[in-house]
Amino acid sequence: MKKYLSFFRLRFSMGLQYRTAALAGMVTQFFWGFMEIMMFSAFYRADADAFPMSFSATASYIWLQQAFLALFAAWVMEDEIFDAIISGNIVYELCRPVRIYRMWYARSIANRLSRALLRCAPILIVAALLPEPYGIAAPADVRHFLLFLVTLFLGLAVTVSFCMLVYVLTFFTVSPQGLRMLFVSAVEFLAGGVIPLPFLPPAVLRVVELLPFASMQNVPLRIYSGSMSDAQMLRAIVLQVFWLAAVTELGSLLCARAERKITLQGG
């Protein structure tokens, strides 16, 4: 375990060095958040009763989404890992006395956490200072806030497990581009990255909520915004734990198989 914690610390420290990139990304996220809220504001002014979430809850959802974008963005993957697999440099990783799945998992968690840490505080502070209902509202109570924190890290772990699955499947393909495009497109929509999932038709929502994508950013952001009942929260957390275990185990098994049968092209 100590060696994987070392990989985590090294990657986390490295990620904290990119402050200029974090500042540029933060400015972009501010403007994107404002545009989204203004767009939803126009819809709510037309007919507020037609939406499953209050405008205040939707605004909180959007600001939390921007603050923790680095935790859940499907496109935040390490090109270094893809390059190692494609170029054949993966042999250096295989020579180390570590499991590459666990090593990459620790690195990916650290990479996302360091990016989020640099950006989340300023976004949350500014969003909290905005007038109601355009800013971020306080959680309903302490219980909702604690459940938000728990599901935030569970959602992060599910997201990283799916990214790991994309890395591992690259062993069995010629190019990872198709996998990345398919994965990013599916996650961004089905995890609530484009619009909150409650805005989908009820029949579609019932199916989507059972999928692993809904266990990513959808759960913590909706718990914070208060758009879930107690029964829905319990069901969502159980699904998060289930999908985390299932996807992680699948990725680990595929990675072990790839390590045994890996074939390098070109030398």
Image (cartoon, rainbow, N blue to C red):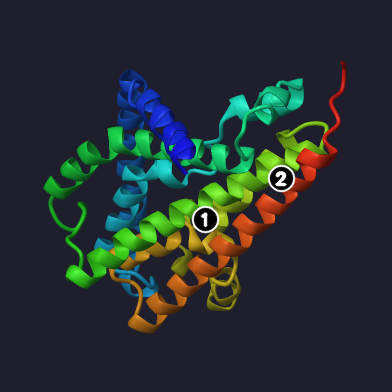
Q: Amino acid at mark 2?
A: Cys
Which quadrant is the C terminus positioned in? Answer: top right
Quadrant for residue 189, please give it.
Answer: bottom right
Q: Where residue 176 sits: x, y (%)?
A: 73, 34
Element carrying mark 1: helix
Element carrying mark 2: helix
Residue for point 40% across, 78% down: 234
- Which residue is at the front of the view, 185 or 103? 103
Q: Which residue is mark 2?
A: 255
Q: Mark 1 vs mark 2: which is more N-terminal?
A: 1
Q: Where residue 52 sits: x, y (%)?
A: 38, 73
Q: Amino acid at mark 1?
A: Val
- Which residue is at the front of the view, 219 or 194? 219
Residue for point 62% across, 52% down: 186
Does the image show residue 217? no
Residue for point 47% across, 32% down: 7
Rendered image: mark on residue 158: 1
Q: Is residue 93 left or right of residue 37?
A: right
Crowdedness of circle 2 by 10 Å Cα count: few (<14), some, many (20+)? Answer: many
Up the image or down, 71 lies above or below 86; here it is below
Up the image or down, 17 lies above or below 106; here it is above
- Which residue is at the front of the view, 223 or 146? 146
